Amino acid sequence: MSASAIFASSEDALHAFLVVACIAVLHIAIRRPSRRHVDAPETSGAGTAMDGAIHQNVIKAICYKVHRPQPYHGWSIHDTKPLPYRAFRYGPKYNITMGLRTIAADEWIELDNEFPKYHADKAARIHERGDKCTRTDPDAIPAAIELLEELTDYLPARYPSLFKRTRVGIDNLWSGESVNTVERPLREDPMALCARLVQDDLALLLEQPDGTYRLLAGCILLAGFWRLSDKFGMSLSDIHTSGNVPFFREKLERGMVKFFQRMNPDTIHGRNNYFIQLDHSLPWSHSIGSEDDPVVGWNTAERAEIIHHHWFRSERQTLRRLPRTRAICFTIRTYFLPITQIAEEDYVPGRLASAIRSWDDDVSKYKGREKYASVLLDYLDRKHQEQMHNGLDVSREEETRRYPW
């Protein structure tokens, strides 16, 4: 029997080999005695536990199956529109949850016809702001390089009309850029190289000896409301508490810590959020103050007086564990539209107005409601009434627009 009859593809053959290797490592991990000196005292078993943890990490890395995504048929840098995420729900109650769902591996990175704008904005930001926006701790360089390698494998397979895999890296067929991923040293920070390939901001959190995860690599160029320089090196918990995320300690922290500890490389998770912004700048919201001011936030913002200053900002975030370094990778893709545009969509103005009214005092402060509520809610209510007058049947919304759409 030929090899092609046994294995449908070279990837299947590789996976079969890795499974065999995984079984062998597992066998060794179980059978091999600890390498502690024979005269070492039998304490609490910490050494054995440590050995077990190391073996488990090795096993998970070896057993991970590299996923080659299917090509996105019909994708076009000219015609493929951004996905219409409308990640808000009707009131009267606003639920504080992580809001995670499983994402198909093929859909890890979303690209569309706004790629040229995002690419240009990112290139300008990298040039103008340097390590204020892009930084990699020495301990995180292996993880950043692994992320670059993951993107180099994924993008040409998923978007073959935009990217081409080369012997030494990846080519962008639209921009003419070539990235050499094997040369050492790399021509620039590996996180910056990654960011130039996608429309997302990127962050890597690495587990520390005490079990916490710290932000040790990132290219945060289009965040709007927060700065990498403020968060770099912080633990996962400190990132959220320093940003005054409502009810983080009470409702989110414990579950989030457990979730991070249990994440495996085979599953990608996603979540969505949304904000109102009072200017049209994608990289940084100037309405809350200068990006270089010591302190910025909704308390430094002016009230919006006209509806055309209101923009809808929605993030689609993904989380995955990199198989080799075990770092947690965040992708943060921002979708950015005028309120006047999304309010023309069926059901959107009524649902968004209900969602905003459902925020309690803490969420309202976090999202800056007092700066725009009167103008925005009046406008959304009028648009909703127009839709109802024109025959919109609210009872049929679930048939056409399910969360997060």
Image (cartoon, rainbow, N blue to C red):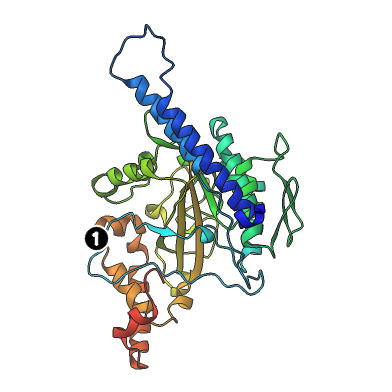
The quadrant the N terminus occupies is bottom right
Please name the residue shown 36% across and 59% down the image: 368
Q: Nearer the viewer, residue 337 or 75?
A: 75
Please name the residue shown 63% across and 63% down the image: 115
Image coordinates of residue 221 in percent, x first then y, are: 56, 51
Name the kind of residue labelled 1 in the image: Asp
Q: Nearer the viewer, residue 248 or 289?
A: 248
The residue that disc 1 covers is: 360
Q: Quadrant of residue 173?
A: bottom right
Q: Where 247 sits versus 310, above or below?
A: above
Is residue 17 visible to the viewer in this orientation of the structure? yes
Q: Residues within 10 Å of mark 1 (few under 14, many from 20)?
A: few
Q: Residue furthest front?
A: 1
Q: Nearer the viewer, residue 138 or 117?
A: 138
Please name the residue shown 37% across and 32% down the image: 211
Q: Where 404 sits versus 150, above or below?
A: below
